Image: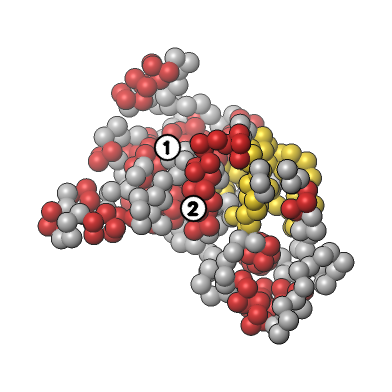
Amino acid sequence: SIPVASVVDGLYELQETIGSGGFAKVKLATHILSGEKVAIKIMDKKQLGDDLPRIRLEIAAMKDLSHQNVCKLYQVMETDTKILMVLEYCPGGELFDYIVEKDRLSEDEAKIFFRQITAAVAYIHSKGYAHRDLKPENLLLDEDQQLKLIDFGLCARPQGGVQSVLDTCCGSPAYAAPELVSGRAYIGAEADVWSMGVLLYALLCGFLPFDDENIGSLYRKIQSGEYDIPSWLSVKTVELLNTMLQVDPTKRISVNDLLKHPWLYEAGKEDVYWKSNYKAQELDEECITEMALCHGLTRKEMRAAVSSWKYDYVTATYWILSNQKERGRTVRLLRRSATSLPDPVTP
Ligand SMILES: Cn1cc(Br)cc1C(=O)Nc1[nH]nc2c1CN(C(=O)N[C@H](CN1CCCC1)c1ccccc1)C21CC1
């Protein structure tokens, strides 16, 4: 079978393995043209077995999600036996390890993280997705201590969101059930808010609200919705937790109402900026120019190549450059270096 090294040859320099799970492993790598570090998630198709559709779903979702608190997908490569996802590298590791190290977070620090988690979830829900596996292991810290959501393998998307459900149900909303017209018809959106409640509790307490070695009694505890309130939690915090940890999903706060909840704004914080900073529509001219120079193409040709969003090396280079710009770094690529760049398109 085709070795992974051959597909990344000249594009990425593979380095050590930084994570390994059942059917996948994550290796640190360097995007040669920019010198930026990336994380390459390498999955074995055979080991994936009938989980393969989950990966196709994860890839489709991540191509559609560009947000400052969602780990960016840069490139997808496939060989006869492997699927490779080139993703944003987060040098801070998992939020899970961060909490373990600090035992538990102060209300102020938890608030900073929770605002970012709410921004990420509000964004993916606005795109018609639900993550359905929110936990501190799936939130990574980047070099600026910003949280990035990962692992969309379990995410769900009703075909085209609520509008399509409305359209399909006999055409006129007169027949649509109340939860449909209220836009609550997401698959799993309410479940995401419950998980956010568990997440916030874990940040503030360092242990879980519902826990038990025996899975049966764990389920009973979850279904009871009863959990201990440690003395260090403020009344306002407990009120917020209660709005999320409502057993009845129809009584549970929505992520849009969470965005307006006063707890997120204490200590004079400004609005949670949940919309995406990425502009996939209008391309960044500075990045296009730098790429055109590096590839020996005109800006017009480069613009056309980038806006085809093939999730090839061109897409990766564009996203990496725009991330660099976003972080206030200089937008710079290696000039036409020895690396075997694809020959410029003959004009
Ligand atoms: C742990 N760590 C420590 C440092 Br320093 C950096 C990291 C690190 O993993 N950074 C990192 N940057 N970008 C990524 C990662 C990890 N990572 C991941 O996608 N990591 C997940 C972690 N999941 C959490 C629950 C189950 C597995 C993973 C998925 C499959 C196999 C192995 C790991 C990406 C690619 C998106």
Mark 2 element type: helix
Amino acid type, mark 2: Ala
Q: Which residue is mark 2?
A: 61
In the image, is 57 to the left or to the right of 146? Answer: left
Residue at image location 62% in from the left, 77% down from the top? 303
Quadrant of the image occupied by residue 95: top right
In the rendered view, would you say 95 is above or below 184?
above
Quadrant of the image occupied by residue 243: top left
Q: Is mark 2 within 8 Å of ligand 1?
A: no
Mark 1 element type: helix
Q: Which residue is mark 1?
A: 195
Reading the chain from its start, which is encountered first: label 2 or label 1?
2
The image shows residue 194 at horizontal and vertical percentages of 38, 37
Amino acid type, mark 1: Ser
Quadrant of the image occupied by residue 328: bottom right
Residue at image location 67% in from the left, 49% down from the top? 79
Q: Is mark 1 within 8 Å of ligand 1?
A: no
- Please indicate, yes or no, whether residue 121 appears anywhere in the rendered image: yes
Image quarter where the N terminus lies is top right
In the rendered view, would you say 300 is above or below 192?
below
* Crowd tier of the residue under label 1, counting other residues whose Cα lies within 10 Å: few below 14, some 14–19, many 20 or above: some
Nearer to us in this view, 291 or 115: 291
Image quarter where the C terminus lies is bottom right
The image shows residue 275 at horizontal and vertical percentages of 46, 61
The image shows residue 239 at horizontal and vertical percentages of 34, 38
Residue at image location 40% in from the left, 20% down from the top? 218
Nearer to us in this view, 236 or 314: 314
In the image, is 27 to the left or to the right of 130? Answer: right
From mark 2 to mark 1, how far is it between C-alphas? 20 Å
The image shows residue 204 at horizontal and vertical percentages of 50, 34
Query: Which mark lies nearer to you, 2 or 1?
Result: 2
